[in-house]
């Protein structure tokens, strides 16, 4: 198979970092055309810097990193330092990046890339709020029909929410952007909390990262050590859920995941359920399916893949 060309739109984030490392470690399946940073877990100044830190950690300083939108379309930015720490990448001590940020705006890079590459050959992988993708679609509606697939982390149905009782963080931060993306007509695959909460880094799984005894393996173990205290306290779970790596793992081995092709709408008006992904899992409406909404994953297979690939870096 030829490697799938992707743009990773990201707000690192420890789990974003692992998703990026997995992609960069998998050149047979994935060609990373560039990373586009967006404000989310932490402000843009940190997410664009963290994206470069992760590229250098992977030994891939030639990767292009662009800065994008610093605030949601219509709302004030909500961040998640309570989960990710002050820098967004708390845990390991990693050096400041020496590689430069690319000139130009992330949104222009997304538009230009989709127009320059053959139609249907570029996949977008949003791992944060959907602001950059929505602005690109608004500014250049012609790109929607050129996108091979949008594989995103966001939303929830059975797990309902994490940042509020009814909304997952990425969708909640910019629900107007999510609404634009889910209505754009491109094929969409969603990794909601229903799946990502099953990608739990238990102690044996984290020990396996540490046992790689490489700078990248140790950094992943230390990021997870930091990240897990939030979920352990909140959910009483055995470890941290690796939300975003579900996206890049899907590109490598889609058979790890199962889901349903259903209609998903985004709530943008309600005070109580703002940012909810209203997923018609049971098919009780006649609204047309617009997304493949994942519901389960083979978590042992996922961690075997992830550990094997991280070992390559
Ligand atoms: Ca993220």
Image (cartoon, helix red, strand yellow):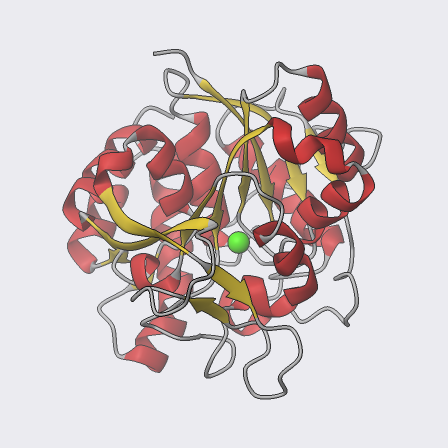
Query: Split into 4 quadrants, where in the image is the C terminus?
Result: top left
Between residues 1 and 293, which one lies in front from this camera angle? 293
Residue 76: image location, x then y, percent: 77, 72
- Residue at image x 67%, y 71%? 78
Q: Position of residue 205 (x, y in %)?
A: 20, 50
Q: Is residue 244 left or right of residue 128?
A: left
Classify 113 as above or below 247.
above
Q: Residue 216: name its quadrant.
A: top left
Answer yes or no: is residue 72 visible. Answer: yes
Q: Is residue 211 visible?
A: no
- In terms of depth relative to the viewer, which is nearer, 269 or 215? 269
In the current view of this chain or complex, which residue is farthest to the bottom?
272
Q: Residue at x 61, y 58 (%)?
A: 178
Q: Is residue 272 left or right of residue 29?
A: right
Residue 226 placement, left or right of 207? right
Percent x, y of residue 132: 71, 47
Specify the quadrant of the image occupied by residue 48.
top right
Count every numbered label the image shows and give the total: 0
Tell me: residue 256, above or below residue 11.
above
Residue 202, x across and y down, in percent: 21, 59
Furthest residue toward front: 286
- Which residue sits at x=77%, y=51%? 69
Q: Is residue 239 above or below residue 104?
A: below
Quadrant assignment for the N terminus: top left
């Amino acid at each position: 198979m030829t490697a799938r060309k992707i743009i990773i739109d990201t707000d690192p984030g420890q789990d974003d970092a692992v998703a990026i490392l997995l992609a960069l470690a998998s050149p047979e399946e994935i060609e990373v055309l560039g990373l586009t940073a967006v404000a989310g877990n932490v402000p843009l100044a940190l997410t664009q810097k963290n994206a470069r830190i992760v590229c250098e950690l992977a030994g891939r300083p030639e990767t292009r990193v662009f800065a994008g939108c610093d605030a949601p379309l219509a709302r004030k930015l909500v961040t998640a330092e309570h989960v990710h720490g002050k820098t967004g990448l708390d845990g390991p001590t990693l050096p400041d990046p020496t590689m430069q940020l690319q000139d130009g705006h992330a949104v222009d890079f997304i538009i230009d890339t989709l127009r320059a590459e053959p139609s249907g050959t570029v996949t977008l992988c949003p791992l944060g709020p959907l602001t950059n993708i929505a602005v690109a679609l608004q500014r250049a509606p012609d790109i929607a029909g050129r996108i091979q697939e949008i594989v995103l982390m966001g939303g929830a149905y059975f797990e309902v929410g994490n940042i509020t009782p009814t909304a997952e963080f990425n969708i909640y931060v910019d629900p107007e952007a999510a609404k634009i993306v889910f209505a754009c007509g491109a094929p969409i695959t969603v990794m909601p909390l229903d799946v990502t909460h099953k990608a739990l880094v238990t102690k044996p799984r984290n020990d396996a990262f540490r046992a790689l005894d490489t700078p990248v393996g140790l950094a992943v173990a230390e990021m997870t050590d930091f990240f897990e205290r939030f979920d352990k306290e909140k959910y009483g779970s055995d470890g941290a859920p690796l939300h975003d790596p579900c996206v890049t793992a899907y590109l490598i081995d889609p058979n790890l995941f199962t889901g349903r092709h259903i209609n998903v709408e985004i709530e943008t008006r309600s005070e109580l359920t703002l940012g909810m992904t209203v997923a018609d899992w049971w098919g009780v409406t006649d609204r047309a399916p617009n997304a493949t909404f994942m519901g389960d994953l083979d978590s042992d297979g996922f961690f075997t893949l992830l550990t094997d690939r991280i070992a390559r870096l």
